[in-house]
Amino acid sequence: MKIQEVFESYINSDKTKSSLKAHKGKVDKYISFTGNQDVETALVESLLRKYIFEDKELKPKGKYDALNNFYHFYYEEILKVSKRNVPLFPIDTKELVSWTNKEKRRPVYFPKEFDFNCLFEDRYYEHLNNYGAALAVKASLSLALSAGYDSGEMFPTNGEHEKAMKMDDVIIEGDYVKVRNFSSQSTVPFILMRGKNAEYIKEYHKLRMSFPIKKAWQKSHFIANTWKTNELSFDPKIASRVYIPHDLVSYMLKYISLKEGVPTPLITDLRANMVLHSLYNSKGSALQDIIELYGFLPFVKQAFEEYCMTTSRDKEPIFSVLALEMVQSEEAFNDEEDEKKKIESRINVIDRLVRDSVKVKKLKKIYGNSCQICNEQITFIDGISYSEVHHIQPFNKFHQGIDDNSNMIVLCPNHHKIFDMGIIALDPENHQRILHVDSKNHLNQKMLVASKHQLSSTHVRYHYENIFMPLRESLLETRKQEVL
Ligand SMILES: [Zn+2]
């Protein structure tokens, strides 16, 4: 039955006359939004969620009421399900509250002592009665919890499948599974998975390779319908039927949360939960590794904020390297001052540090870690190479250089040192010509071997005038006196 047909009975039904005026337009809009599919595939969580929260034209509350009403009409009047037995509307009213006045809702977090392993316990999956479906959920949960994938990155929804993860984003290598890193803020291309989570991915991969995928738009995707819809059975209090992987994972999260007596997170919240719990388990020291892997993306930021709020009484330092900068920026707040400001300041410090280190890494990547003066590339035994980034106008309080590509040059450690000291400089008239304090030195008047980014004249001139020239003059002075 097409959703449009249900809508027609809905309009003509006496039962809905009173509420119809307010709801009709919104339901009608939903029908064109779904492209008039069969009602069962149109009334699914992922689409409802998208329409209610992501469509910016109308406020979520109105759309929620209209669709909730229509949903009940469908079950009670078309399917003749008694009121008590209608499955839960896939979106909870609480979500509307957490969405209001915020661009993005706060994730729902599992309690501190929650054991993620219970999400994989077979006893919760038995009622589905389907190996392929259970494994698809376990693989999705593993990707979320160990590789930080969220629903948009894992699941194709009809029409938006370009964004979702593909078969070749997953590489099986012996005991390991390598998954493409989705984060644009990170320079780490793959996330390495091992242990139990890797096993679920491997097992699913095997099944996925041999399973005939029916839906054309899922053919190249890693997580797809590896089951037949009519084979599944559900807890009717939560859902009667589920058609696509996104909704199946949501359903299982609801099912397990109810059984465990914990709040139900969205699939998208799992990665924030993963970050929060690794912060708990490591007393905060995991943050640096997490940032290395994902950058300081909103879900990392949110989890860190939650961590600071729930552990704000702990007096222990949060993590070593960043701690000093953090303490300095927190000096401005005394004890009586609001905890919230302190947390914000921590987040700002980390945010800046991350942005800076991402900039430096990107620049080094452009030059393949080779020195712009001598082309030297220092390579360690495992193929990892090393270079340094020099700030032409020094990046400190005294010289007040800025942390921007136009003030940076990639160098080997030797040339970094002599650039720092002012023994060499770049010509302020031609940013690619090297000047040496000793005009007879082989580097003098040589050009940079690689120059792939623009430098700012201000910074080049600053280094030349304030660091290079004073050194050169004092050396010439010394030589004059020696000659005499
Ligand atoms: Zn060099």
Image (tube, rainbow, N blue to C red):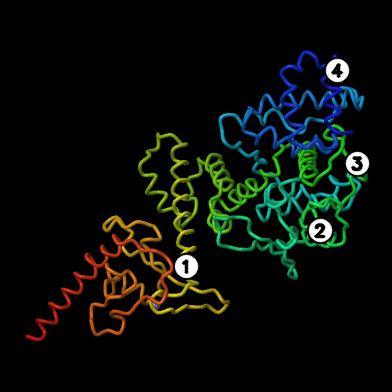
The kind of residue tagged 1 is Lys
* Residue 77, numbered label: none
Q: Residues within 10 Å of mark 2 (few under 14, many from 20)?
A: many
Mark 1 CB lies closer than 8 A to ligand 1: no
* Distance CA(mark 1)–CA(mark 3): 54 Å
Q: Would you name the residue on which mark 1 appears? A: 364
Q: Would you name the residue on which mark 4 appears? A: 13
- Whether residue 315 sits left or right of residue 156 in the image: it is left
The kind of residue tagged 3 is Ser
The location of residue 444, given as percent across then percent down, is 28, 80
Q: Residue at point 14% right, 82% down? A: 479
Instruction: Using the image as rendered, state which of residue 464 and residue 352 is in the foreground.
Output: 464
Corner quadrant of residue 86: top right
The location of residue 474, given as percent across then percent down, is 16, 74
Q: Earlier in the sequence, mark 1 or mark 4?
A: 4
Can you say which quadrant of the picture contains the C terminus?
bottom left
What element does badge 4 sit on?
A: loop
* Distance CA(mark 4)–CA(mark 2): 46 Å
Q: Earlier in the sequence, mark 1 or mark 2?
A: 2
* Residue 233, numbered label: 3
Instruction: Using the image as rendered, state which of residue 285 and residue 458 is in the foreground.
Output: 458
* Residue 204, numbered label: 2
* Distance CA(mark 1)–CA(mark 4): 67 Å
